[in-house]
Image (cartoon, helix red, strand yellow):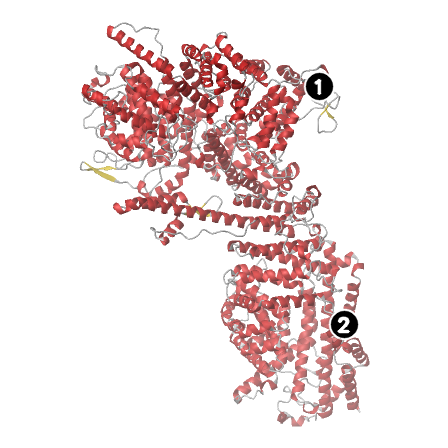
Amino acid sequence: MAAQMAVNSGASLWGPLKELWENVEGAIWRKQPESVHLLDLQLKKHKPYFLSLFKNPPKSAEQREKVRKASTEGISIQGQQGSRLLPEQLLAEAFILSDLFDLGELAALELLLAGEHQQPHFPGLTRGLVAILLYWDGKRCVANSLRSLIQSRHGKTFTLDLSADLVSLTTRFTDELMAQGLTKQILNLVSDISVTREFEKLQKERGLGNEKHRKEVSDLIKECRQSLAECLFAWTCQSPLSKDDTLALIGHLETVTAEADGSLDSVNLALVMALLYCLDVSFLEQGTEDRDDLLQAQPLLTEKQYVSAVHSRLVEGQAWKLPSLQAVVRLTWALSLRALSQLPQGAALVEFTEADEVLADQALLGGVFLFLTEGILGSEGFHQEEFYTRRLHALITDFLALMPMKVKQLRNRADEDARLIHMALQMGSEPPSSLRKDLEHLMILIGEFYSKDPFGLELALEFWCPTESLQHTSLTGSFLGVALQRPPHKQVVLSKFVRQMGDLLPATLYIPYLRMLKGLANGPQSSHYCFSLLKTNGAPHGENLQSGVSGSPVSWEHLFHSLMLYHENLRRDVPSADSTQYRHPPIRGITQRELDGLTAFLQLLTTIVTWSENARLALCEHPQWTPVVVMLGLLQCSIQPILKAQLLHALAAFGKSPEIAASLWQSLEYTQILQTVKAPGQRQAAGIEVELNEIESSCEEYPLTRAFCHLISTLVESSLPVNLGAGLRAPGFQPYLAFLRDAVFLPFPTRAYRRPAEKWEVAEAVLEVFHKLLRDYEPQPADFLQETVELQGEQVPAHKPPGHSLMFHLLNDSPTLSLCLSLLEEGVCQLDTYAPFPGKKQLESAVLHCLSLLDLALQKEVVFMDLLRESQASLLVSPLEQLLQGVSAQSRRADHIINIARYLYHSSSNPEAAYLSAKILRHIARYPNIQTRLVGDFTHDQAVSDKLMAGFVECLDNDEAQEGVEKADDSDPDKRVARIRHEMQIHILNLLITSLELKGPNLALYLLGYEVKKPVSSTNLQDPGVLGCPRSCLHAILSLLQRGSERRSGPILTQQAPHLAELCYQVIYQLCACSDTSGPTMRYLRTSQDFLFSHLKHLPFILPGNEIAALNQMSWLMKTAAIELRVTSLNRQRSHTQRLLNLLLDDQPHMQHADGEMGMDDESKSVSSFLHFDTVSKVRRKLLSVLDAIDFSQEVPEQLQLDFFERTQIEQVISNCEHVNEQGHTVCNVKLLHRVLFAEVNALQGMAAIGQRPLLMEEVNSILQQVVERNRVRCSLSAKRHALQSWRSLVETILTACPAELIPPDQRQLIIRDLLLDLHDKVLSEDAAVELMPVVAGAVFTLTAHLSQSVLSEQQQGAGLEGGSSSGFASIANSALHLILRKLLDFILCTGGGFQRLRAHLYGSLLYYLQIAQKPEEPDTLQTGMSMWERLTAPEDGFSKLQRENLAIIESYGTALMEVVCRDACDGHEIGRMLALAVLDRVLSIDRQSQWLVYLCNSGYLRVLVESLRQDDVALQTLLMPQPPLLKPLYIYESKMALLTRVAKTAQGAVELLCCGLVAQLAECRVFHMLPENDSFRVFGQRDPSGFIPSPLERYRQILLPTLRLLQVILTSTTTHHQQGAAQVLQWLIVHSDTIQSILRSQDVSMGSLQELSLLTAIISKTALPGALDLGQEINSAAMLEFQGHIGRFQRQCLSLLVRLAGTERARYLKQIEESVAPGDAAEKREEMEVAMQQICANIMEYCQTLLLQSSAEAQFTVCLFSPSASEPTDMAVPSVSRVPSLGLVLLLLKNSATDFFRYHDSHRQSLGKLQRLEQLAPEELKELCQGLVSGSGGVEKIPSVQRSVLAKRRLVQLVNNRAKLLALCSYNIETCLFVIWRHLEYYLLYCTPSDPKDSLLPGYRDASGGGGLGLSRVSQQDLEQLQNDVANSFTEPLQRKLLEVEGLYSKTHSRHTFIQALTRRIRGLVRHAKS
């Protein structure tokens, strides 16, 4: 039992029923798919609710006990574990509720709990009050569901176009219910439930809250009763009731009473109509295909008992409470019997059908027609149901058609009565009182019934028989067919009735007959027939001619004739304007009867003229009648205001035609109805103003004023003449506007009104005119100029357009504006009472006009004020949004904007006012200064604040809003309201979006529930109701989006209201993107809502009809997801990140979708399926399917085909009309364009133009359609671009921001592969839009970069390629890599000539791609290399294989690709050029066949590049200024030099470069002369604080070093043409010798200077040789001498540099190297500097060696470079150049090199050891190693351990290779030093002849041999001996051993083996030999 006693938190009396109603509505009204099945389940489940309709679960003692104990023992709640203790208070309320509604205690408790849960949706109500609403809402859901089910039945009257199985389901279900006695249940409920009784019960228990709650409860109860009654009505419409049910229904109606005004209420009306349909047999005439089935089912035809029972009940039953209702039913029965008697089945029922006459007479005695008019037509519900009107139409027409004798009888009686009355009048006695007016009542009924046609059925057409075929496409009577077909009998009878009634009409029937015609003329076709009738009636008939009487009194002829007579008579009495008797109407007036007759005629005229334009023109142009003139004349006469009003209405109807309106304006002005021209000396006003102020005000009725407003309103809409009244006054509309404003609008609140509603009618009428005037006003520059017009010889100021005047009043604190605002305040206060009051409808309409005026003023004020400023006129205006902040006169508070916002609270009852209110607020929200004040105003008073918030939320929550309803479809009021509600939601969301872009506190933050008084970021968002958190707009937006997100079809909103959904997603994105709101929002979405996951899983959204919105929805959602991924990654919320990543990236199907819902599309199984043969079927990755949803193709509208307009001019006009819309797209303003083109067409003059006008208009239309299409294309493209960008940012976030270990490397590569291939497939398709390419290129770049990084890191982490495995590289197969490369190259080629910036991305991608195949740096282990043969036969490793294949693919593209890349390298955008140069460089480096090089040379691009160095020179010179402009030229220059260096690395390339004159170009560059001073001591001035811009000296080095490297490479490569190259380079050295010498002399020890020196010395050592000049050219001796001088100088400087580096200052250099490296820097720098120092020594020693060798092959003729002194050089400050360095220097260098060698060798061995046991290294060591690569102290801490070992490995490889380089240099130095020492010793000790001091005067001793030493002084014998001793002392055994050890350790494998050994032996021999 306990199980059943669990409480359902959804309340069994509400939750399930709400769900039931949603299902029924979904199936029947929304026609949702899958709904039939769901409905079937729901109906089976809820059948008990229908069977025991509205019965509550009974009370029981057991339940009562259980509930009582809930506060102590707790109670279990379904879906929650354990039991929950409930507070006493709640239980007490539950008992009250249980007693109140007499329902079970548990059910009452459930209702309260549900009320507590739903409370946030009902701000301001307690849970008890909400529970009462839920109770009745549950009942309403049952009633509405039942009604919908019955309406969907199959039957005789209507069909809802539902599927057959749904109809059979509902028919079966409702039949079962009916069999169980549904009718009696419904009738009992309708009698039992009454609002007053329920309210009394609730009042007693304090169950009623505020006015809104009362209204909602009463509306719910009324809706329950109404729906129940309509259930029966719908049933009888479709199928008949059984005998008992019919009698029960009659029994119920017998007791019915009427309302106070004699009409039936809507519930009883529905039941009466149900009975009328029960007794209906007219459907048998329709002849539908299922007629026979319907016949069988109709008991009237098949069951005699049925007929007899009903008959006896109606004929002999007791009198009803409403006898006239009984009469209606009797008449209906009589007509049914008459119809039955004409059917074959009627024969059996003869005994009853005889009685039809009697019944009809009884009905007529009961006043049936009067009751039909007052009781049924007068009921407010009558005109809301189409089938009520159809049934009543059938009733009236059946009476006329089936009982013609009765009608005749009525007419005869009426004629008789008329005679009696006439006689009584003649004799002056009272007419008899017993006269019956049945015919009069019948005519009035017909007139009243047909004069309203809310559904546009035009049923009155059945009364008109088309004698001539109408000029209409559709020929409708109630028959469809050909023009000449005979109309049905019924139609003939009816039309005869109309005509005959008009013949010889008695006076008593004159007015009823006119009223009947007025009703029958209501409709576009009916009015035409009626017009013709009145026209033909007027034609004089033959027999009347003799008597001289014109035709029938009901004819145009007669009517207009009498009007003219009245005019003639009354005109004589018009007093002069000054006479005062004007106010006393003259004696000869119009009697009341005449007045009624005229009014009836004028109303008929108004109806016909309103509907029929032909009638309007025909009457207006009739020469005798001249209606307009006569009516205007009558208006000037003295007649009752009511008649004048009628005349004005008739004129207004004529004014609907623009051509009549124009002349009507002039006539109006001429007759001075409103006096616009005052005669000189006239004392008082005349015309309508007097009538208003004196006559109408004293009568307290204002029909004339209202009619005048109506006339003006109509005329203003048709045409507004500019020159109205010209010649008599300043032309224009101004006097009319002034009258309306000052005499009608401003005084309206203070006038007295006999009928309270009329106050609002006046306001509505005048505001309507203002609204139209302002709506059609566009501010023009001319409006602001002060123009004058000439009037009777003097200049008077001209009037402005009326719209201008209104704008001026609205933009000032004028009475007009204050009245509008106070009207709004009054309006909202009245609405807040929720009570009906007279004039409510008109007040609402007036409020709408006021709001529209404000809205229009806000729209137009910007243009208006701009024009005003430009015109410099002296008008003063204030922006409306500031005026709205003014203080209200009534409340003394600044609450205008609050009053406007309060209309949102009434959005359910007044959607339009709420819509305009939202629109106005949105205009105001653009201004940041107003926002902050508004937030203060809105939150100032808590009650107001809650109400406003509730209003906004209610608008967003509204279920009835519908998107996609076109404006044109406003005929259906429901659709119109749905559209308005939707647009209101759009405005509110746009308001939020606009506000969020402004700084806080702003409206959006307040409405979305963030803190506005504390910092925004401190907000703690909660679900509504938690911690007192109200339901905010954010909750509303989320619940809109969440609806349906748990279903498979995805969020409903995205399909039903795509634009709304898009804005909702945008608001959420903005909240997540803004730094203040991001934290709270994302926390809330993640924890309470799981928002992102539940929405992303439904991506991609595909909306066939609305692609743009779907793309934008996805864009905002993906952008939000990107933020979420970034934030969760930063906060280390791994599970969240992982979950989202799996959702987006998984390609394994999830088990819960085992039914293959997410299966692959066939075409999407692209290449990936060929590359992977997986057993599991894959699904498409979410990211890829989103990409699939973006269609890259875009159809473009074709060119305009114009016949009249000039295309270029039209294009110009279109571009002038372009503006940026809210979404930021540039689109053409179609309305403006339409205005411009229209004005152009209207400006055409002449007959030809008028003839062409229709064609011109057609062309204008085609232009406008074209522009609309263009706008759509632009929006579509930008939506696609937006979606792609969001997709790209999501992909980039996934790859960069998410922790790498969440996606394993192999997966990562496959994902990138898939993304890349898909992106390329889409962008390379034929019709891809070029506008999307840049985004794709950007994405391709990022993806390729990540692919390359991923592959490299995978290799570094030891996946290695030792195996050279066949599948290829890393986890990604080679074939996939090749595919990516091919697509990338295709993409580059397909971009063609333009798009260089786009290609920059692609070049970047290509570079990253080619990087994959680059071999990583390997440690130089100094081991014996393989032999050449082994190298050639070794298997190819993975890198080379991939590289070879890459190259083959690149070459397969041939010259097309080369052409594009070379062209981009030569000119265009800087970044593009740099990247193209880099691509060329990269390709050349792998191009073993030199195809690219050949192309580069042959096509002339190489020459272009070389020659462009001259232009670079100019740009580079500007770079050396202290503050350089831009560094771009430098980067391009570096890229270019890198490429040229690459070209120069092959012999062929180097030769080409020399041919192109590269060195000559470089020699002419002036930038090399501009060596800046060493700026170490004046560094503070120019250093860029960020360190980004290098100092001038560093910049100079960036220019010089690439050139030096290039020259060095050229020297190395040009083996065959070495002489030629060397000579050119020497030329360059000589041209820039100043610079070079200052560099060589420089004392600076920095990385840069050492690099410079090492490169310079390398070049000098290869070029500055004596032999360089023997080129065979004839060089004159002077030039020769100059050359020799330069070379000599270079030699001397190099040697002195050697002295500094190896000797005197070596210690200082080493010390400076240690110091110059800052502790934070990476250790690489110091190592590079060491290498540079060794390199310089090696270069100079090589130079010495070359010089020695070049001078002579044998020692005895050698040149001496060093002086014969082996003592170590002393520490001199600066060695003078003139002094020759001694041989001791070389010895010193030798020793140092040997020492260094061993130091480096140890270091090399240690590092190699560490590298081999990398895994075993201690963490400290790893950290220390990483420190070498990571600058900054804290950097290493942040690196993950996996990364650390990779870095440590890289550092060790670097160390090993650096040491290997140093070892090579040391060994080379040792070898050259030994050679130089040996050569010199051999010369000095063997061949040198020591000189005597006395020979000192002789010239140099071996000058003859050409060049001798470097100016050596004479060598004495003593020097030589000293030399010998010193060398013997220095060149000791230990040193020799060391040298041999070096050879053992190194030279064996790396250079000439035993070279050191031999030289050591020789030197040792020389020293010994000399001693001996």
Q: Secondary structure at mark 1?
A: helix
Please state, as top left, top right, bottom left or bottom right, where the C terminus lies in the image: bottom right
**Frontmost residue, 479 versus 773:** 479
**Res. 664 image quadrant:** top left
Mark 1, other Cα within 10 Å: few <14 / some 14–19 / many ≥20: many
Residue 259: x %, y % from top left = 46, 13
Residue 804 x, y percent position in the rendering: 33, 37
The residue identified by callout 2 is 1422
Q: Residue at x 68, y 77 (%)?
A: 1738
Give the left or right position of residue 1872, taking residue 547 as reference: right
Residue 203 placed where, x, y %? 57, 14
Amino acid type at circle 2 is: Leu
Front position in the image: 252 or 763: 252
Which element is circle 2 on? loop
* Residue 1285, image x, y percentages: 56, 50
Disc on the earlier residue, 2 or 1: 1
Q: Nearer the viewer, residue 852 or 197?
A: 197
Q: Nearer the viewer, residue 300 or 895?
A: 300
| Horizontal side of residue 1621 vs 1141, given as left or right | left
Q: Residues within 10 Å of mark 2 (few under 14, many from 20)?
A: some
Can the viewer see residue 710?
A: no
Q: Residue 1090: which numbered mark, if any?
A: none
Q: Which residue is mark 1?
A: 67
Number of the front mark, 2 or 1: 1
Amino acid on which the number 1 mark rests in the picture: Val
Residue 1582 image-quadrant placement: bottom right
Judge whether residue 817 can be spotted in this image.
yes
- Quadrant of the drawing holding the N terminus: top right
